[in-house]
Image (spheres, rainbow, N blue to C red):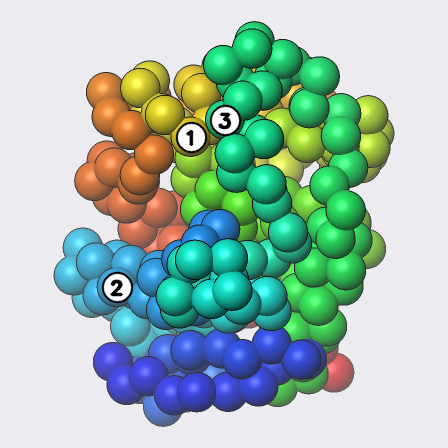
């Protein structure tokens, strides 16, 4: 696979076009987590293709870079989708107050969502693919953004992939997810996650299940990371979605 740099909307992205040279059958957009460089999830494309070589021929992989630089906050090269006070978050966890955050709308999340939606609009114009041929996902803060963006889209996507995410905007997300019953989610969360405790992933899983979505939940004995089993299931999911006959926007 050959990576190119591309500006989509107003986000800089690393993009892997299909190696076949043909238009993609599926577009996969993955958002990195807080404090990571914009290229943090790029190796995931190679892991997925190693599990299923056909993905390289049929799938367009897109890795957007978050807009906020964190160099001045002591994280050189780190990026964020919206400002986050990590110390305050950890203090809330220590005090047992995390539950009150589940219906919080973080300042800046709507702006991040609009940036991502603009990038998706560019991708739709370039590929001719409908939203039903898109898979959005991400890790940690990127998973939160992918959830928020997917639920605010005017049409369903093919699937949603959430690695170590959490529940935010509970009342809004539940209303939007319920109106989109029948959606599909792949979700993973570590039982010993030291950043976003395991129960926060359970809250998110339960929200989707109550809203009538199909949730493939990967529970693993680990910390704040993406486990190999989740990558394997993600490769199978993408292979299944990419094989469906594409319907292009005219």
**Circle 3: element type:** helix
The residue under the point 70% across, 59% down is 112
The residue under the point 39% across, 66% down is 76
Badge 3: few (under 14), some or many (20 or more) residues near its Cα, within 10 Å? some
Q: Name the quarter where the C terminus is drawn.
A: bottom right
* Distance between the alpha carbons at the discs numbered 1 and 3: 7 Å
Q: Which residue is mark 2?
A: 43
Q: Which residue is mark 1?
A: 195
Q: Which residue is mark 3?
A: 90
The residue under the point 58% across, 20% down is 92
Q: Earlier in the sequence, mark 1 or mark 3?
A: 3
* Distance between the alpha carbons at the discs numbered 2 and 3: 28 Å
Q: Is residue 4 visible?
A: yes
Q: Name the spot of residue 32 as percent of width and height, x first.
A: 45, 56
- Left or right of 62 on screen, residue 106: right
Is 202 situated above or below 63?
A: above
């Amino acid at each position: 696979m050959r990576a190119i740099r591309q500006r989509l909307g107003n986000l800089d992205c690393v993009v892997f076009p299909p190696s076949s040279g043909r238009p993609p059958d599926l577009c996969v957009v993955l958002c990195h987590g807080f404090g990571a460089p914009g290229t943090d999830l790029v190796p995931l494309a190679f892991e997925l293709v190693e599990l299923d070589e056909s993905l390289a021929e049929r799938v367009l992989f897109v890795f957007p870079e978050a807009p906020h630089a964190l160099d001045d906050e002591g994280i050189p090269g780190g990026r964020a989708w919206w400002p986050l006070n990590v110390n305050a978050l950890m203090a809330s966890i220590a005090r047992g107050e995390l539950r009150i955050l589940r219906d919080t709308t973080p300042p800046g999340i709507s702006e991040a969502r609009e940036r991502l939606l603009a990038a998706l609009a560019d991708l739709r114009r370039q590929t001719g693919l409908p939203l039903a041929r898109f898979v959005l996902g991400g890790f940690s803060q990127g998973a939160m953004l992918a959830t928020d963006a997917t639920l605010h889209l005017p049409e369903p996507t093919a699937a949603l992939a959430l690695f170590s995410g959490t529940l935010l905007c509970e009342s809004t997300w539940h209303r939007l997810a319920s109106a989109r019953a029948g959606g599909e989610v792949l979700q993973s969360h570590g039982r010993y996650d030291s950043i976003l405790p395991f129960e926060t992933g359970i809250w998110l899983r339960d929200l989707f299940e109550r809203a009538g979505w199909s949730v493939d939940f990967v529970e693993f004995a680990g910390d704040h990371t993406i486990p190999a089993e989740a990558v394997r299931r993600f490769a199978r999911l993408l292979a299944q979605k990419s094989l469906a006959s594409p319907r292009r926007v005219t």
